[in-house]
């Protein structure tokens, strides 16, 4: 279940299901039952259901009824006027025969369980008034919070906090997750997320055709380059990492190691002559070639066997790097642009984008938030996390490249709006040089012929898994060395799945 549905897409899934003959109240009943079962698993002493005025509140009324039927002490606090409930929510409320009180903060008990059925994923305006006070009281109550669909106050499409948001221990959503379950800061509010089957058929997605996906091996494993028994190093591609000068060789070495561990058959560092000796001494499996300036790089890359280039880590910001980038983009090869390769075009991004769009080959951009703001300056005011998915898509469309917007919730977007959201990166991955390794790993997969969107998404996942496998204390040099174990498990799991 990799698909992530926007709130409008989820509404369409409901509509299509109802049009096919399932009553809306049946969907609500199944949703409420799923929530009730999550509460029962916690063996609560008492339960407070905080219900809002819409269908999310209706789910809460169903959950309350099921819990009471299982002999749990349950009450409902309603935000709004009971007489104004409409449709399925009104039916669900009518079926509840227990206590209904007007919602107010002082009625939130200490401890126990609170079912957050205020707003769910559809909230598109700031939380104010009594609702805000209720969320604040629940967050401070020490209660175990089970959110219906999504914690109240979180925007389902962006993960943004709409003024104030519930901090849930777990969230029960329906049919498919929303982008807000994975994007920060929403993900930090959700707790453990479970997806309940409420009777919406998977075939409904054929009509909706969602374009946002949760990043996982099931999306890209069929394109993953698993070495064949009759393969050899030349069949696995040759990646080139362009190095900066003598003082900045470490970043290129990290990228080269990442490319090699990701499976590229050969990796060469194109080094300025003043740094050649350093690279020659410090690399063994990675080759080194003396290359100074754009003309020499173009001459070197004329060999068509060099089918992937990584430029940016430690290259320095300025005209020399711009010239190197444009030289690499002229050829028939995959190109990964990271770090200084991006910032070097901050004053003239149109030149870069035009060069990318002239190509018939893959280009991947890997900005973090600062680089995104510099390269796409008109998006700078939007470059904070809540709009991350929207910005990534806009950047991909404008540049003509695959855009990998880095962070704890890395988004990979391609022109045409397909995007993945990653969610396995541990906090200790935020360390100097980890992005250099990431860029190299992408180049390593591209050298082996993996499609660019899939290669970028796979790399982000592998990067996170390697960091998880190593654990706290990680430094960037550890990431490539943790990759073999991750790859071993990945490939073994894929092989077992087809047996």
Image (cartoon, rainbow, N blue to C red):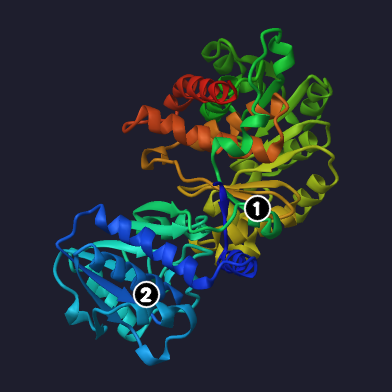
Q: Residue at x 29, y 70 (%)?
A: 64
The nearer-to-camera label among 2 and 1 is 1
Is residue 123 depicted above or below 374 in this figure?
A: below
In the image, which disc is placed on residue 203?
Answer: 1
Element under disc 2 = loop
Quarter of the image where one finds residue 266: top right
Measure how far apart labels 2 and 1 are at the Cα level: 30 Å
Is residue 387 depicted above or below 405 in this figure?
A: below
Residue 460: x percent and y percent?
Answer: 54, 38
Q: Residue at x 45, y 69 (%)?
A: 28
Can residue 203 be seen by looking at this rendering?
yes
Residue 425: x percent and y percent?
Answer: 44, 41
Residue 56: x percent and y percent?
Answer: 42, 72
Can residue 155 be seen by looking at this rendering?
no
Q: Quadrant of the C terminus?
A: top right
Q: Is there CB contact under 8 Å for labels 2 and 1?
A: no
User: Which one is in front, 75 or 209?
Assistant: 75
| Residue count near mark 2 (Cα–Cα under 10 Å), binned few <14, some 14–19, many ≥20 | many
Element under disc 1 = loop
Disc 2 target residue: 118
């Amino acid at each position: 279940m990799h698909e992530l549905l926007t709130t409008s897409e989820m509404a369409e899934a409901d509509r299509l299901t109802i049009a096919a003959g399932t009553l809306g109240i049946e969907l609500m009943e199944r949703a409420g039952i799923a929530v009730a079962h999550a509460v029962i698993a916690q063996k609560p002493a008492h339960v407070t259901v905080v219900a809002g005025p819409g269908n999310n509140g209706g789910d809460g009324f169903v959950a309350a009824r099921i819990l009471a039927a299982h002999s749990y002490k349950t009450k409902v606090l309603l935000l709004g006027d009971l007489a104004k409930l409409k449709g399925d929510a009104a039916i669900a409320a009518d079926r509840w025969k227990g206590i209904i009180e007007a919602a107010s903060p002082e009625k939130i008990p200490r401890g126990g369980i609170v079912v957050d059925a205020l707003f769910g994923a559809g909230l598109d305006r700031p939380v104010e008034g009594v609702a805000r006070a209720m969320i604040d009281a629940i967050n401070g109550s020490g209660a175990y919070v089970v959110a219906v669909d999504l914690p109240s106050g979180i925007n389902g499409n962006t993960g943004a906090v709409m003024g104030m948001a519930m901090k849930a221990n777990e969230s029960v959503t329906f049919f498919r997750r929303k982008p807000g379950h994975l994007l920060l800061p929403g993900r930090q509010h959700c707790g453990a997320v479970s997806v309940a089957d409420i009777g919406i058929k998977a075939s409904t997605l054929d009509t909706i055709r969602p374009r946002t996906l949760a990043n996982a091996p099931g999306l890209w494993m069929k394109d993953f380059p698993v070495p064949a028994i009759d393969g050899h190093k030349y069949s696995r591609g040759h990646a080139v990492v362009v190095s900066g000068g003598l003082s900045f060789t470490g970043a290129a070495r990290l990228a080269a190691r990442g490319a090699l561990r990701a499976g590229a058959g050969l990796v060469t560092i194109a080094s300025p002559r003043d740094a050649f000796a350093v690279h020659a001494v410090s690399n063994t499996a990675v080759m080194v070639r003396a290359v100074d300036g754009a003309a020499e790089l173009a001459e070197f890359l004329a060999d068509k066997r060099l089918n992937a280039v990584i430029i940016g880590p430690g290259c320095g910001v300025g005209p020399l790097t711009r010239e190197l980038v444009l030289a690499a983009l002229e050829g028939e090869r995959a190109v990964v642009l990271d770090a200084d390769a991006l910032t070097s075009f901050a004053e003239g991004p149109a030149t870069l984008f035009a060069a990318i769009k002239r190509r018939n080959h893959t280009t991947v951009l890997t900005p973090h938030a600062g680089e995104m703001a510099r390269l796409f300056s008109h998006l700078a005011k939007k470059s904070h996390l809540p709009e991350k998915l929207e910005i990534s898509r806009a950047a991909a469309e404008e540049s003509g490249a695959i855009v990998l917007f880095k962070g704890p919730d890395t988004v990979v977007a391609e022109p045409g709006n397909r995007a993945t959201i990653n969610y396995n990166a541990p906090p200790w991955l935020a360390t100097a040089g980890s992005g250099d390794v990431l860029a190299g790993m992408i180049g390593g997969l591209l050298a082996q012929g993996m499609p660019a969107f899939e290669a970028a998404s796979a790399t982000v996942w592998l990067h996170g898994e390697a960091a998880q496998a190593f654990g706290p204390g990680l430094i960037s040099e550890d990431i490539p060395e943790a990759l073999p174990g991750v790859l071993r498990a990945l490939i073994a799991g894929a092989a077992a799945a087809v047996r």
